[in-house]
Amino acid sequence: EADLESKLPLKGKKILITAGPTYEAIDPVRFIGNHSSGKMGFDIANEAANLGAEVVLVSGPTHYKAKNASIKVVNVISAQDMYEACHEYFNDVDAAIAAAAVADYRPKEVALQKIKKNAAEFSIELEKTKDILSSLGAIKKNQFLVGFALETENEIENAKLKIQKKNLDLIVLNSLQDEGAGFKKETNKVTFIDKDFKIEPMELKAKEFVAQDILNKVILHFSKL
Ligand code: CTP
Ligand code: CA
């Protein structure tokens, strides 16, 4: 019994995870998206479930399938869909990990018909999407809230600002600098920064192992409660 518990350190914990890109419609056949594969979020979800957690995975469009049948997958398309799905579950969870690459902007208006190539020039007016993670940070109670940060300059400073602005407990800073890290890759090189601004650079490793490192932080947090 005790042995089983030590192998399932997240048993009894509910975790909300976001994954993948979001697609923001331009017209019925086109969208604005990004190259996120969803792998990081799915790896975190699978690992969390293997560690005994009850997982809700809110995912944008991706070809990944959850490996662990216990994972509740909520498929969404747009940032607004993802926002609504996350708020449906957030009050009920012990931790949330935002690995999704949410679109920052969406077309202000979605054309009802396919846009024809009549004009020589064409532009689309964009408006900001809701920041899902910030909105969760603003209402969080005891939830351990983990965000990601993708930066190309002043990485540490910008990541620290995100911790404060979004009321996070931990941020996972992605280094695009590194050859083996980021979108469409099997590996990732991250740096952890906690809410006390303690900085912990990690080695380049397979995303599965990055997922384990992140969940170790979650487990450590619960162990201190
Ligand atoms: N995020 C979110 N909702 C958004 C945008 C981002 O929940 N509309 C989350 C991401 O899932 C990630 C974190 O916020 O965990 C940081 O995303 P990132 O793109 O690095 O930062 P932004 O806050 O969007 O700021 P910017 O892109 O200007 O650096
Ligand atoms: Ca962004």
Image (cartoon, rainbow, N blue to C red):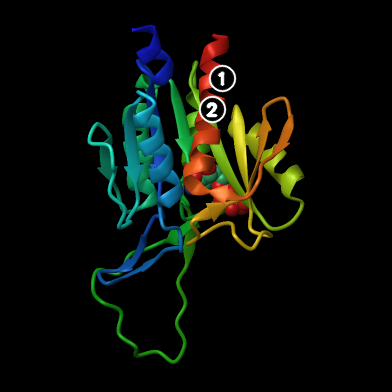
Q: Is residue 208 visible?
A: yes
How many residues crowd around disc 1 within 10 Å: few (fewer than 14), some, or many (20 or more)? few
Q: Disc number at residue 216?
A: 2
Q: Quadrant of residue 95?
A: top left
Q: Is residue 131 visible?
A: no
Provide the secondary structure element on which disc 2 rests.
helix
The amino acid marked with disc number 1 is Leu
The amino acid marked with disc number 2 is Asn
Residue found 66% across the figure and 41% down from its top: 202
Q: Residue furthest front?
A: 3
- Are dots 2 and 1 in contact, CB under 8 Å? yes
The percent position of residue 184, horizontal first and vertical second, equals 47, 62
Provide the secondary structure element on which disc 1 rests.
helix
Say above or below: 144 vs 57.
above
Residue found 51% across the figure and 41% down from its top: 209
Q: Which residue is mark 1?
A: 220
Q: Where does the C terminus fall, quadrant-wise?
A: top right
Residue found 71% across the figure and 35% down from its top: 200
